[in-house]
Image: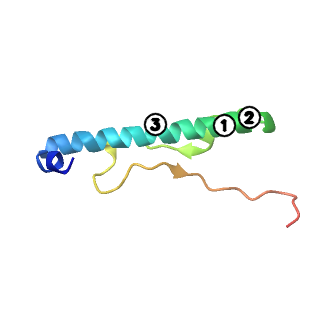
Amino acid sequence: MPWEFDALDQWQFRQLLAGQRARQRERWQQLAQLAAWLLAPYSRRKLSAKHFMKFSPDPLDADDTAEARPVPRPRRPRVGTRG
């Protein structure tokens, strides 16, 4: 609530922010794992969530101004396809 937000001190605000970042990271990891499971039957390689997203080591290490978002890996062009 807005009145509760105004009453927070700096430490409490940082704790709430860290919790939000951890929840976001968990959601992105779940989505990447789901993508790995869905595409595994069509791939020759053994896929994992790491194949789709590169995560920072710890969401608490991110600076306060930037959001802890996963960085998508660049796509490699397909070889031998007609364009």
What distance separates the C-alpha of mark 3 from that of mark 2? 21 Å
What distance separates the C-alpha of mark 1 from that of mark 2? 6 Å
Residue nearest the viewer, comparing 61 with 65: 65
Report x, y in % for residue 62: 34, 48
Mark 1 lies on a secondary structure that is helix
Q: Name the kind of residue labelled 3 in the image.
A: Glu
Confirm whether residue 58 shows in the render. Answer: no
The quadrant holding residue 42 is top right
Query: Dot 1 corresponds to which residue?
Result: 36
Q: Name the kind of residue labelled 2 in the image.
A: Ala
Residue nearest the viewer, comparing 20 with 66: 20
The quadrant holding residue 16 is top left
Q: Name the kind of residue labelled 1 in the image.
A: Ala
Confirm whether residue 69 shows in the render. Answer: yes
User: First in sequence: mark 3 or mark 2?
Assistant: 3
Query: Dot 2 corresponds to which residue?
Result: 40
Q: Is residue 53 above or below residue 82?
A: above
Report x, y in % for residue 4: 16, 45
Report the side of 4 relative to 34 (left or right).
Answer: left
Q: Residue at x 63, y 41 (%)?
A: 51
User: First in sequence: mark 1 or mark 3?
Assistant: 3
Q: Residue at x 65, y 40 (%)?
A: 35
